[in-house]
Image (cartoon, rainbow, N blue to C red):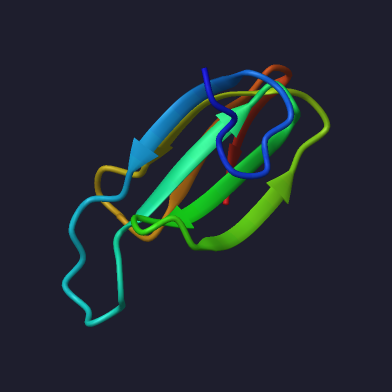
Amino acid sequence: METLYRHSDYVNSVAFQPSRDDDDDDPLIASGSDDCSLVLLSNRGKKRHVITFGSPVMTVMWHPAEEAKLMARIHSGISVK
């Protein structure tokens, strides 16, 4: 088992961003972990953002109707970023 970029504990969820219509470089990959962080990477592995929560990130997924929105379920509730 390998550690996904910047995570220091188990990774609970990985989501690939749906294809985008704009000319941005890559679709994004989001991962949520027991280390209470959500990491956004380009599909080429370049780190884009790290968001830290107060409890483990259990699930990440892109909003089905608004693909620019990423949803995260943390151990203590739900957050939309």
Identify which residue, 80 or 17, lies in the foreground.
17
Residue at the spot 46% in from the left edge and 44% down from the top edge = 30
Identify which residue, 28 or 77, lies in the foreground.
28
* Residue 11 position within the rendered picture, expressed as x and y whole percent measured from the top left: 57, 23
Q: Is residue 12 above or below residue 71?
A: above
Horizontal side of residue 41 vs 62, given as left or right: right
* Residue 29 position within the rendered picture, expressed as x and y whole percent measured from the top left: 40, 48
Residue at the spot 36% in from the left edge and 59% down from the top edge = 44
Identify which residue, 25 or 54, lies in the foreground.
25
Horizontal side of residue 37 vs 63, given as left or right: right
Identify which residue, 60 or 25, lies in the foreground.
25
Q: Is residue 1 above or below residue 50?
A: above
Q: Residue furthest front?
A: 1
Residue at the spot 42% in from the left edge and 54% down from the top edge = 69
Where, by quadrant of the figure, is residue 78 drawn? Answer: top right
* Residue 27 position within the rendered picture, expressed as x and y whole percent measured from the top left: 30, 60
Where, by quadrant of the figure, is residue 52 drawn? Answer: top right
